[in-house]
Image (cartoon, rainbow, N blue to C red):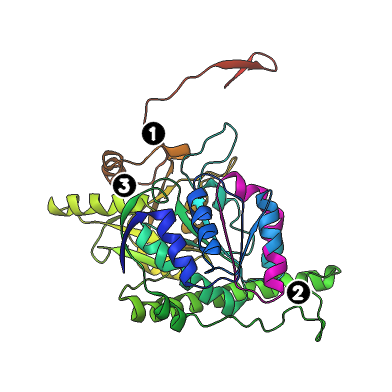
């Protein structure tokens, strides 16, 4: 069914079609309207349990209990909410609970900012959650049932990451697969080892050093297995919806000499610039990394080796190189590939086509590492620190 709604609202429709048994949310910009939508579905009797909590930490903590008891569970948050969940995010993965969470990507404080970048979810990349990044709302809606499918088969939680405002508040036409077809794809969940008074088990127990590492090794190995399940889910969903996805999505890559790589909605603009430059005879292409965890190292290597590559990071790692750049650079180690790093677009500074054209131009000259400068540098106020040193405020 084609629906014309905001991204957040239409995502609520698909979540309801997936029949979660327990939803727990604390509203936060930019996903507040999704929490409202899910609460309405609860009021209408289509979601059995909706827990109104006092904070994001409590939302995920409530779902840890519900998931351990065998329920299909869902929540949503973004930005500061992700950071407030930091401890239970690790616990959810370590306890092997298949929670699905929609993240409306948002900058993190300080200074306070509600606009889009990817620092919130990138900061959780080592937590043990599968991470799916969506270029547009159609991809996001289609990712929700696939996330439940994979999570419940491998017993790992999944983040579906959607750019805040740019997608959550964008009103557009989206095809939402109807409830019956979703249910055929995603049958009722049966936890293989749920909490049960008739068959007692322990979850999240204390582990001494020897056993703790064994748990982490298992988590690492099953994250690798998740790659195959993500491909399986995408293939099955393609038969249901007619839309096909993979771990990565190449755009006009085969003969491309220069390629820009990134996550999320910024890549739709990159695709447009690729079309523009192709019309002028330039051999350029793009690669969207749809699945960031597990990191599709071999797939990226095969897609990019021998090309001039620029990585677009909308997150930074303070004191180190940009995160997506570093991991892609490692994947391409040993190949004749020039890899450049373009990082920035933080706190809602958008990436316009003029800047993308500039990035493609800079790739001609060899590897570079630089901020994406959208506006003239803001000098700001300065305060003295220590012996005459100055920092921007």
Residue farthest along the front direction in this orientation:
44
The image shows residue 17 at horizontal and vertical percentages of 46, 71
The image shows residue 375 at horizontal and vertical percentages of 37, 29
Residue 296 in sight: no
Q: State the residue position of label 3.
A: 363
Secondary structure of the residue carrying numbered label 1: loop
Locate residue 201 relative to residue 327 in the image: left or right.
right
Residue 173 in sight: yes
- The residue that appears at 40% across and 68% down in the rendered structure is 142
Of callouts 2 and 1, which one flags the residue occurring earlier in the amino acid sequence? 2
- Image quadrant in which you'd find residue 130: bottom right
Mark 3 and mark 1: Cα distance apart in space:
16 Å
Whether residue 230 is situated above or below residue 29 in the rendered picture: below
Nearer to us of marks 3 and 2 is 2
- The residue that appears at 33% across and 51% down in the rendered structure is 171
Q: Nearer the viewer, residue 93 or 77?
A: 77
Which numbered circle lies on residue 373? 1
């Amino acid at each position: 069914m084609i629906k014309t709604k905001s991204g957040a609202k239409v995502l609520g429709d698909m979540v309801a079609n997936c029949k979660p048994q327990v939803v727990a949310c604390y509203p936060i910009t930019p996903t507040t309207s999704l929490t409202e939508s899910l609460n309405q579905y609860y009021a209408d009797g289509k979601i059995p349990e909706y827990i109104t909590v006092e904070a994001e930490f409590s939302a995920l903590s409530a779902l840890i209990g519900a998931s351990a008891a065998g329920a299909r569970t869902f929540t949503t948050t973004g930005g500061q909410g992700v950071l407030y969940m930091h401890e239970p995010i690790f616990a959810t993965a370590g306890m092997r609970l298949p929670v699905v969470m929609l993240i409306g990507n948002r900058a993190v404080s300080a200074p306070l900012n509600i606009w889009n970048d990817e620092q919130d979810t990138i900061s959780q990349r080592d937590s043990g959650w599968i991470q799916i990044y969506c270029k547009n709302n159609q991809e996001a809606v289609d990712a929700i049932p696939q996330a439940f499918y994979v999570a419940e088969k491998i017993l790992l939680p999944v983040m579906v990451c959607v750019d805040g405002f740019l997608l959550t508040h964008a009103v557009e036409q989206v095809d939402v697969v109807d409830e019956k077809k979703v249910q055929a794809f995603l049958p009722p969940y049966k936890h293989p080892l749920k909490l049960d008074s008739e068959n007692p088990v322990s979850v999240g127990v204390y582990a001494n050093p020897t056993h703790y590492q064994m748990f982490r090794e298992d988590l690492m190995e099953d994250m690798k297995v998740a790659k195959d399940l993500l491909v399986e889910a995408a293939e099955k969903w393609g038969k249901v919806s007619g839309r096909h996805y993979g771990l990565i999505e190449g755009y006009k890559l085969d003969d491309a000499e220069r390629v820009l790589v990134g996550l999320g909605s910024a890549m739709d603009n990159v695709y447009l610039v690729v079309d523009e430059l192709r019309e002028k005879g330039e051999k350029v292409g793009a690669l969207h990394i749809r699945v960031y965890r597990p990191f599709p190292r071999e797939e990226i290597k095969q897609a990019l080796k021998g090309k001039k590559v620029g990585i677009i990071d909308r997150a930074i790692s303070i004191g180190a190189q940009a995160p997506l750049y570093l991991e892609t650079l490692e994947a391409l180690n040993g190949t004749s590939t020039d890899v450049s790093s373009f990082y920035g677009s933080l706190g809602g500074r958008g990436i316009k086509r003029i800047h993308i054209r500039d990035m493609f131009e800079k790739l001609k000259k060899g590897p570079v590492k630089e901020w994406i400068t959208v506006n003239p540098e803001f000098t700001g106020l300065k305060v003295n620190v220590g012996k005459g040193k100055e920092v921007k405020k």
